[in-house]
Image (cartoon, rainbow, N blue to C red):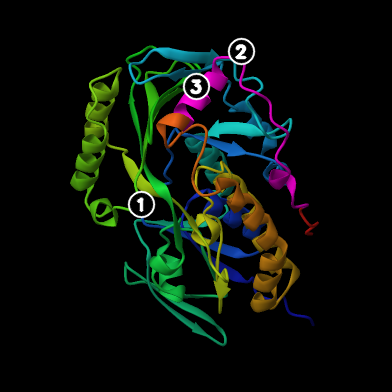
Amino acid sequence: MTGTLPKRSALVCGASIAGLAVAYWLHHYGFDVTVVEKAATVRGGGYPIDIRGTAVEAVRRMGLLPQVQKVHVNTHRITFLDADGGTVAALRPESMAIGADGDLEVQRGDLTRILYDAVRDSVAFEFNDSIAALDDHLDGIDVTFRSGARRTFDVVIGADGPHSHTRRSVLGPEEGFHHYLGACFAGFTLPNHLGLASEGLLWNTPGRSAALYAVGSRQDVFGLLTFRRSDPPFDAFRNPDAQRELIAATFPDDRWEIARIVAEMRAADDLFVDVVSQIRLPRWSTGRVALVGDAAYAPSFLTGQGTSLALVGACVLAGELAARTDHAEAFNAYERVMRSFVTLNQALAGDGDTELFPATEQALIQRNAALRTLSALPADRPHAEYSALTLPDYH
């Protein structure tokens, strides 16, 4: 009589997009999956994210593409403003996309909800908890949770973002892997006091910008303040009050709507402040622990590829684990498949300069002059980097 092999078990740290996607795929391949998340629930947020190239195929393989297409953002106009709020250019965005046909832009919270709904009944979730200690040994990895619970898993997957606690536990402090790109940002929601509908506004001065982004005609809009800074203000980031003071001091303007936006930033209960940076690791795994998404290879929002890399990486990591009984071989294969794709997409950020956020007066003048000659944002060639990886067939 032949016995049935027990299911392999996996702990996923972080109910992020990467975490939910890798949980989906691991369950799909027959793993017993637990997701631990330090927050009380899956976190959303309304800011826009992109799903491009190979990532669209990853979503299609999950059977979720029709749901994601339904929440595709339909933006009608992008208006560029000067320092006084005057219109530099108001452009149609239909030729804005620099990816291929079929690429998608959605609100982060919509994608998170779709992924969570796909796994909530088949994967165990442990909210309000996190990992306290890991003990990797020959037969598994023992996990002690902050709650005091202890369990043993076959593998642990760190999907807990660019400031990953899992990565720090097994690979050391973030400073060794953090590549600063010379800017900081603050994102938050605020009341739609300008009555925006399916449009974006972008205000620029050299080295600083403020953006408002309206999905449909909702009562709230997403706000984003960015600013250049030679050194990352890590001390301020440890204190929410210090974050708000730093941003207010950087945007003292009384022109356009800046004073009102800063006041709303101070009151926002969903303020998220961070540096524009990348995570660059020599390896994405050690022992029975592997990293995926921003925890392994955050590319920065300047590339627009963080979500896409997370979705593709989750698909590849789970597929390689399913194809191999040895976790070390699977982790090595995951890196062989993904490494060049990640490197190409991280390179899109360059040294942190971008036409959307000009760093100097001359760059801003040149950008605005070019915008005034346009009726629509120019169509660029589809970035080959977005589709540089063909997903393997995992069964």
Mark-to-mark CA distance, 2 and 3? 13 Å
Q: Earlier in the sequence, mark 1 or mark 3?
A: 1
Q: Is residue 331 left or right of residue 217?
A: right
Amino acid type of disc 3?
Asn
In the rendered image, residue 24 lying in the magenta stretch gets the answer: no
Mark-to-mark CA distance, 1 and 3? 42 Å
Q: How would you rate the neighbour count of disc 1 (Cα within 10 Å): few for under 14, some for 14-19, many for 20 or more?
A: some
Mark 2 or 3, closer to the camera: 3
Q: Position of residue 312 (x, y in %)?
A: 66, 52
Q: Position of residue 373 (x, y in %)?
A: 59, 14
Q: Which residues are magenta?
A: 363-390
**Residue topped by disc 3:** 368
Q: Is residue 359 left or right of residue 372?
A: left
Q: Quadrant of the C terminus?
A: bottom right
**Residue topped by disc 1:** 39
Amino acid type of disc 2?
Ser
Locate residue 162: give its quadrant. Answer: bottom left
**Residue topped by disc 2:** 375
